[in-house]
């Protein structure tokens, strides 16, 4: 299998789909993975991607996904981890079990994804592991401690892995999406397609000038 393979976990109609379309346009075979195959399959068919079932909250599911993609399409050289679980509420009202599950889906799922990707990329000294972050990756808001915990953890994971894996040729990058993703591009709003263009720009960076993290926002977003 000589074609380039990309795997996007937590795929949906937003950033991940836009990134997939741009990858396909540049010659990649793209695997989209999500828990809900009924929603995912039509999206995959519409852009010519392959659909796979995976549950980000299950370590075994992610591990099985990588084996299945490798067997079906080949070794992925680009992997994007996109899922996150939102649990909102003040500290007294939050359910500790729900917060634990949310942090696990967001952070531990990202770790297992990175581990499985690294196993396959390190022997080839080549690949890219991307993580979709949020404003909550760098700024904790009141009533959003459960969400911020998971996103802060993913940022720490990405920073550590960038230092660990860059020397062996693997590009690790964390994307802080600072603001709401819009559907209408009017007034140069931040759309999924616009964000995906930045993902592609980071993917195509020369090794002499790699970025491990970038904040993305519209020209009108305050920060």
Image (tube, grey):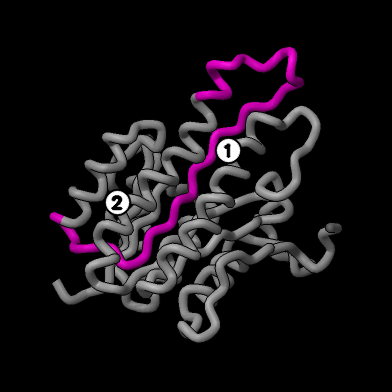
Residue position for label 2 = 116
Residue 183 found in image quarter: bottom right
Magenta stretch: includes residue 139: no
Magenta stretch: includes residue 90: yes
For the N terminus, give its image quadrant.
Answer: bottom left
Marks 1 and 2, how far apart at CA:
20 Å
Relative side of 151 to 6, left or right: right
For the C terminus, give its image quadrant.
Answer: bottom right
Viewer-proximal residue, 136 or 218? 136
Task: Classify mark 1: helix, strand or loop.
Answer: helix
For image coordinates 84% across by 63% down, the residue present is 220
Relative side of 100 to 41, left or right: right
**Spot occupied by residue 51 in the image (x, y as percentages of width and height):** 29, 49
Q: Main secondary structure of the magenta part?
A: loop
Relative side of 195 to 93, left or right: left
> Mark 1 Cα within 10 Å, few/some/many (few <14, many 20+)?
many
Q: How many marks?
A: 2
As displayed, is residue 170 above or below residue 15? below
Residue position for label 1 = 150
Q: Which residues are magenta?
A: 71-100
Relative side of 222 to 110, left or right: right
Task: Classify mark 2: helix, strand or loop.
Answer: helix
For image coordinates 59% across by 60% down, the residue present is 175
**Spot occupied by residue 57 in the image (x, y as percentages of width and height):** 40, 32
């Amino acid at each position: 299998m000589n074609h380039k393979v990309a795997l996007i976990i937590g795929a949906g109609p937003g950033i991940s789909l836009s990134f997939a379309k741009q990858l396909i346009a540049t010659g990649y075979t793209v695997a989209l993975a999500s828990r809900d195959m009924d929603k995912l399959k039509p999206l995959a068919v519409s852009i010519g991607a392959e659909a796979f079932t995976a549950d980000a909250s299950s370590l075994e599911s992610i591990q099985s996904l990588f084996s299945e993609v490798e067997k079906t399409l080949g070794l992925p050289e680009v992997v994007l981890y996109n899922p996150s679980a939102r649990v909102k509420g003040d500290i007294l009202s939050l359910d500790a079990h729900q917060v634990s599950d949310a942090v696990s889906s967001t952070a531990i799922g990202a770790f297992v994804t990175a581990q499985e990707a690294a196993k396959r990329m390190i022997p080839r000294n080549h690949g890219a592991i991307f993580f979709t972050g949020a404003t909550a990756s760098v700024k904790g808001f009141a009533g959003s401690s459960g969400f911020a915990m998971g996103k802060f953890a993913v940022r720490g994971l990405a920073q550590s892995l960038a230092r660990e894996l860059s020397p062996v040729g693997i590009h690790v990058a964390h994307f802080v999406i600072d603001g709401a993703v819009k559907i209408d591009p009017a007034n140069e709003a931040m759309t999924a397609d616009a964000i995906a263009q930045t993902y592609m720009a980071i993917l195509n960076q020369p090794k002499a000038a790699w970025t491990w993290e970038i904040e993305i926002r519209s020209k009108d977003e305050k920060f």
